[in-house]
Amino acid sequence: MIELKSAGEIAAMREAGKVVAGVHAAVRERAGIGVTLKQLDEVARTVIEEAGAGGSFLGYHPSFGATPYPGVICTSVNGVMLHGLPTSYRLRDGDLISVDCGAYIDGWHADGTVSFTVGHAREEDLKLIKVAEETLAAGIEAALPGGRMGDIGHAMSTVGRGAGYGMQNDFGGHGIGRAMHESPFVPNEARRGRGLRLRPGLVIAIEPSLMAGGGDAYYMADDGWSVCSGDGSRSVHVEHTVAITGDGPVVLTVA
């Protein structure tokens, strides 16, 4: 069932979105050469706890996950596209990392992801991040009341594929609210004018991921969580929680 949110409920989700944005800022500031992914998770836990919030990811156990999720953020490095575990891996000069975070306050969730580089950045990585952010922006701009869900996926794939990058459509966006994952599914690639009619009060997480090698294949790593590009190429993931309103889309996961 799809639940439309009231203005007050969207405002409550906005508070959770501020926590997610705060986690992203703190983790980006702490990330550096030699810092472990576990240490970044500890930073995120502190931000969430000090905000009086909870971590949406901690203990989450979907059908595809090998175990309950052990952290409050996903830390996907280089060829890991999604759901990378916060391990003892130490960041190296030139690493590309995506940090996905979900948080909730008073039972209302928000979810967002940022991607950035550590140390000396490769030009191709900066381009990949830029295009991913443009892909996300195109999806958000298409999230208009009266439009269709397919408009969002079409807008994103036009940008991402137009730049020559690979995309996958099995792990996409989702509705969000009282639960971190709600209906409907938000595809990364779709046909314009098709799918669910977008209505004010619908709140969705829009989250494209791109693979630099241009292929669409991916595989699950031995840890049972990390989704990796099939050809080992660098990957990025970006995401915002977005409310569809009568005045257009409103991004909730910003400071």
Image (cartoon, rainbow, N blue to C red):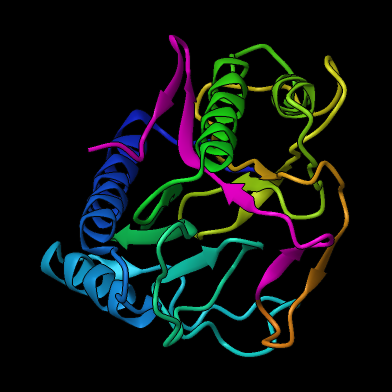
Q: Is residue 253 magenta?
A: yes
**Left or right: residue 187 compared with residue 26:** right
Measured as percent of width and height from the top left, residue 214 is found at: 82, 41
Residue 107 visible at all: no
In the image shown, does 131 or 91 lie closer to the viewer? 91
In the rendered image, the vertical position of residue 210 relative to residue 24, given as above or below: above
Judge whether residue 113 is colored magenta.
no
Q: In this view, does 163 lie to the left or right of 91?
A: right
Q: In this view, does 238 lie to the left or right of 38?
A: right
User: Going 50% across and 60% down the picture, which residue do you hit?
Assistant: 179
Residue that appears at 55% across and 43% down: 125
Residue at 57% over, 30% down: 136
Left/right of residue 113 with respect to residue 140 in the rendered view: left
Quadrant that contains the C terminus? top left
Where in the figure is residue 221, as x and y percent of width and height? 74, 79
| Numbered range of the magenta stretch | 226-255
Nearer to the camera, 129 or 74: 129
Q: Where is residue 55 in the image (x, y as percent from the top left)?
A: 35, 70
Can you give x and y, in whole percent of width and height, for residue 180 in the image?
51, 59
